[in-house]
Image (tube, grey):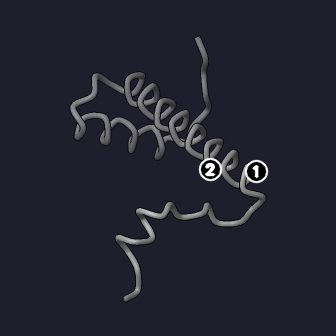
Amino acid sequence: MVQARVSEAEAAAAQADAALLGLEGTSEAVREGLAQLHRRAQLSALAKSYDDFFGGEPAPLSDVTAALYSDD
C-alpha cells in the first residue's frame, strides 16, 4: 500500500471527480490517474526513441505517403 499527502481541496476534488466518472472512490481514481501517468510515460519514451533513432530529424516519408499528400 502507498499513501500520499494531498490538500483537503485536492482530496475533495478527487472525490467529486471520481463520483462524476462513476469510479468507486478515491482509491480507484488514484489507480486511474496512475494508469494514465504510465501511458503518458510510455508515449514519451516512444517519442524519445524515435528522436534518438532519427537523430532529431523528422522521419522520412514513404513514397506512397509522399504521393498521396503531394503539394501538387
Mark 1 burial class by Cα count in 10 Å: few <14, some 14-19, many 20+: few
| Residue found at the very far bottom of the displayed protein | 72
Q: What's the residue type where badge 2 is placed?
A: Ala
Where residue 72 appears, as percent x and y from the top left, is: 37, 89
Give the residue furthest to the top: 1
What secondary structure is found at the residue carrying circle 2? helix
Residue that label 1 marks: 52
Density class for disc 2 (Cα within 10 Å; few <14, some 14-19, many ≥20) is: few
The numbered disc on residue 68 is none
Q: Quadrant of residue 51?
A: bottom right
Query: 69 or 21: which is nearer to us?
Result: 69
Location of residue 46 in the rendering, given as x and y in whole percent from the top left corner: 61, 43
Q: CA distance from mark 1 to mark 2?
A: 9 Å
Q: What secondary structure is found at the residue carrying circle 1?
A: helix
Residue 13, image x, y percentages: 39, 44
In percent of the image, x 35 and y 35: which residue is there?
Answer: 15
Q: Which label was assigned to residue 47?
A: 2
Task: Say left or right for 64 vs 42.
Answer: left
Q: Is residue 63 left or right of residue 25?
A: right
Q: Residue at x 45, y 70 (%)?
A: 66
